[in-house]
Image: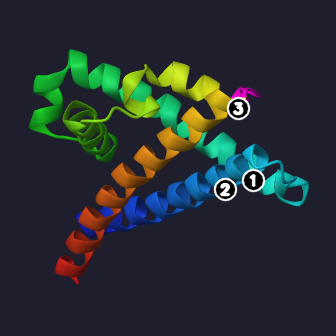
Amino acid sequence: MSHAWEKAQSFERTQQLLRAVNTVSLHTKRTLAGKGDEANAPRVKEARELLEKFLTALAADLENLTHNQAVLSASPAPAGLFARRFQRARLECRDPSPLFARPLPEFIGLFDSTQPGKRQELVQGLAALRKVLEEHHYTDSVSLLGEL
């Protein structure tokens, strides 16, 4: 598979993740405001499943990054590159988001919470995830346009 094709796939995957973040975030905000959003329940469920799967894989990538730093630096895979960006964002964060302040498996647990405080933490964490994804998306965009 060519480098440009891998970048294009990463670009599309990031688009899907950003849509999922926006869908779940908007739904959660509407729920916190007491406004029902049942019409979008199937779309929210699909978005939530995508994010949970992605965050679970990211947690594994972060674990591998910690244990195999030398191997990943020799030939980083796309998931490894995002894990590195995520780890850097976590280390550079001055006002820790719930996404960075707790282990990812604990953050994933916020998707199931019905407590308003926990739902607010989910919204804050999704905002941080959106920012890291947008930075990743920008890098992919620049790389793709440079290769065309």
Earlier in the chain: of badge 2 and badge 3, it is 2
Q: Residues within 10 Å of mark 1 (few under 14, many from 20)?
A: few
Q: Position of residue 115 (x, y in %)?
A: 73, 26
Which residue is disc 2 drawn over? 26
Residue at 30 percent of width and 22 percent of height: 64
- Whole-number angstrom distance, CA of label 3 to CA of label 1: 12 Å
Q: Residue furthest top?
A: 67
Residues at discs 3 and 1 in contact (Cβ within 8 Å): no
Numbered range of the magenta stretch: 111-115
Amino acid found under the numbered disc labelled 3: Pro
Q: Is residue 20 above or below residue 120?
A: below
Provide the secondary structure element on which disc 2 rests.
helix
Residue at 60 percent of width and 37 percent of height: 120
Q: Which mark is residue 13?
A: none
Q: Residues within 10 Å of mark 2 (few under 14, many from 20)?
A: some
Amino acid found under the numbered disc labelled 1: Arg
- Whole-number angstrom distance, CA of label 1 to CA of label 2: 6 Å
Earlier in the chain: of badge 3 and badge 1, it is 1
Residues at discs 1 and 2 in contact (Cβ within 8 Å): yes
